[in-house]
Amino acid sequence: MATGLREICHEADLCVVGGGMGGLLTAVAAARRGAKVVLMHDRPVLGGNASSEIRMWICGAGTRVRNLQETGIMEEIALDNMVRNPSRNWSLWDALLYEKARFEPNIDLILNCACSEAEMSTPDSARSTPPGPSGATPLSEGSTPVGNRIVSVAGFQSTTQTRHVVRAKIFADCSGDSILAPLTGAPFRTGREAKAEFGEEFGLPEADRRTMGSSLLIQARETDHKVEFTPPPWAYDFPDDEALNHKPHECLFKPHTNFYWIELGGEADTIADAESLRDELLKIAFGVWDHMKNHGDHGADNWELEWVGFLPGKRESRRYVGDYTLTQNDVEDGGKVFEDVVAYGGWQIDNHLPGGFRMESQGGAHLQKRRLSEPYAIPYRCLYSRDIENLMFAGRNISASHIAFASTRVMGTIGVMGQAVGTAAALAVEKGVAPRGVYEDKALLHELQRRLMDDDCFLPGLRRDVSPLARAATLTADYGDASDLLNGVDRRIWGRDNGYFGKTNCAVTYAFDTPTFVNGFRLVVDSDLDRENFDGHPDLLTIPMPLFRGLGYGNTSFTFPRTVLKRFRVEAQGADGTWETVFETADNHQRLIRGAIGRECLAIRLVPLSTWGSELKDNDYGSSTVHIFAFEPV
Ligand SMILES: Cc1cc2nc3c(=O)[nH]c(=O)nc-3n(C[C@H](O)[C@H](O)[C@H](O)COP(=O)(O)OP(=O)(O)OC[C@H]3O[C@@H](n4cnc5c(N)ncnc54)[C@H](O)[C@@H]3O)c2cc1C
């Protein structure tokens, strides 16, 4: 195979294919939990649709339901971006995502490398593939596994003309398009299910193969002078609003929207037809900008086209079949308990019609929208293949019906799935089991959930196990009641604040009866999950990276959440009664902070010194208020 090409072989515990938000977080989570990871990604920048190549902003459960912003690695990235990229520059965003993978010691990052081959173990004839339920969307080409275990995958790196072969114990397909489905025979679905299959309200009378379409985005900025625009001669002409089917185009004045309806492909094949769809989308995109500038008064005289995406973002293609398929009913029943919850969603059901741009509809391309009032659980069984024993997935390709996918597809939700898959893969490798083994062994499943919550992931219905050391000690606070620090819930939810309101320079102390060895501490501070306590354009506070930059918006940049504890120290009291500083920082910007102590202590205490808000005069947060969700010895 591929004789004449240079070939490099890699060995890993986990190989992640595709570096969108799902793949990136899968890789980072697994690596931080000790797995050796190869991340093979076919683009030069990470983030998939959230990268500068496509420029879609990350939404999640918290965009629609209060206090539900994703935490864990997603929040770490969001806070890093706010502090390091206040003007929201796309290249700095790319650099941040690149850094998370490139400088993580356990990740071997292979960029510009498209996975195109998989080697399977010998087919296991003893294992038969159960037929799909009657009325199901037909499972496509991949319904006959060519072996039930992936041995290796290979990809071509165009920059070096090298074939990279990766042998791994577990593979996570985070390519969006599920490239490992045609390569391995893993079962998958495409299209929209019939109502009869899962009893979904939004299901169709009959299943079909149509999907949501792909879109390319436009970015523009306002200047202080008139800017002319001459469209390329091949752009479509939209002489009036009727020619655009009256699609909404007020995004120059509503910065939290964009031309998302430049969308095609739902009636075609978003994979096989991707190149011709791109050509059509470009004609539409330049035509739309021509319409804005030259056909009618759209307030665009001083606006300059800054960027047009030449790589359309895909909304939908293949979805894998796992041990469980998430449905509309699961998504709408936020109270439904899954013993194997490992992630959650909360974005509305946001279903686009296949017709996309061509639809004669005024309101964009939406078929159904339904807001959810509660987060819903995503079970672990949606994240690994039913038939390929070492294949997992995180992204828009998880095991979900079309309607459930219409909610799970946003990148905040995909990020927390990625953290779950990475953490589970590392656990499976550590314990020598297949991904399904983590579900089947309830002790392992509990351990997975414990690790996720310890890493600041929120799992609906579950409480984090507070450390035994904290339980054994006596907790006191110089100011107020700190008892909620021990309730195992690290965010405002379920009608409770779940945090501790303290004051700067007032310590929170754990005292032990006898000298006790303390490894370290775990601290979770309030990072303002609702994004209320920082400054910026009100419509842009929950949008990490906006597209349109108008002079009239005032400022498209943001400050930093005032609630975050910036300066603090942790002190330990030795057996002789003296206090010593064991951890000190003057510029924390993270929500989850862990520090080492590594000694026998009679007590440890947190001394908060300032928040990002206490440096501002007259701020509405209170100059000496400190709000934390967890602090404990571990
Ligand atoms: C126009 C548009 C608007 C949207 N609006 C929003 C929004 O406002 N907020 C939101 O959160 N979500 C939005 N979404 C949905 C969201 O962007 C996608 O559902 C999400 O990006 C899917 O994430 P993913 O990680 O599965 O895939 P992707 O983001 O597509 O990432 C997968 C990556 O894998 C790479 N890859 C593919 N094949 C291979 C291969 N063979 N080898 C190696 N690498 C490969 C791809 O290049 C890609 O970068 C939108 C989508 C579109 C198209």
Image (cartoon, rainbow, N blue to C red):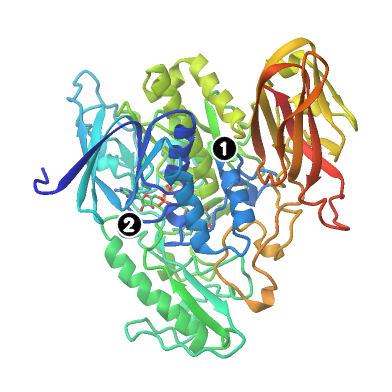
Question: Can residue 338 be seen in this snapshot?
Answer: no
Q: Residues within 10 Å of mark 2 (few under 14, many from 20)?
A: many
Quarter of the image with the N terminus in it: top left
User: Residue 26, which numbered label?
Assistant: none
Element under disc 1: strand
Image location (x, y in percent) of residue 417: 49, 38
User: Residue at position x 40%, y 70% from top?
Assistant: 358
Real-space CA distance between mark 2 and mark 1, rounded to the nearest whole angstrom = 27 Å
Residue at horizontal 48%, vertical 45%?
Answer: 100
Vertical comparison of 292 with 179: above or below = below
Q: Looking at the rendering, which quadrant does residue 301 occupy?
A: bottom right
Q: Residue lying furthest right in this view?
A: 479
Dot 1: within a 10 Å radius of its alpha carbon, few (fewer than 14), some, or many (20 or more) residues? many
Q: Amino acid at mark 1?
A: Tyr
x, y percentage for residue 443? 51, 14
Q: Residue furthest top?
A: 514
Q: Amino acid at mark 2?
A: Thr
The residue carrying mark 1 is 344
Please indicate whether residue 153 sits to the left or right of residue 522 in the image. Answer: left
Q: Quadrant of residue 250?
A: bottom right
Residue 36: x percent and y percent? 38, 31
Residue 492: give x, y in percent of width and height.
74, 38
- What residue sits right under mark 2 in the picture? 270
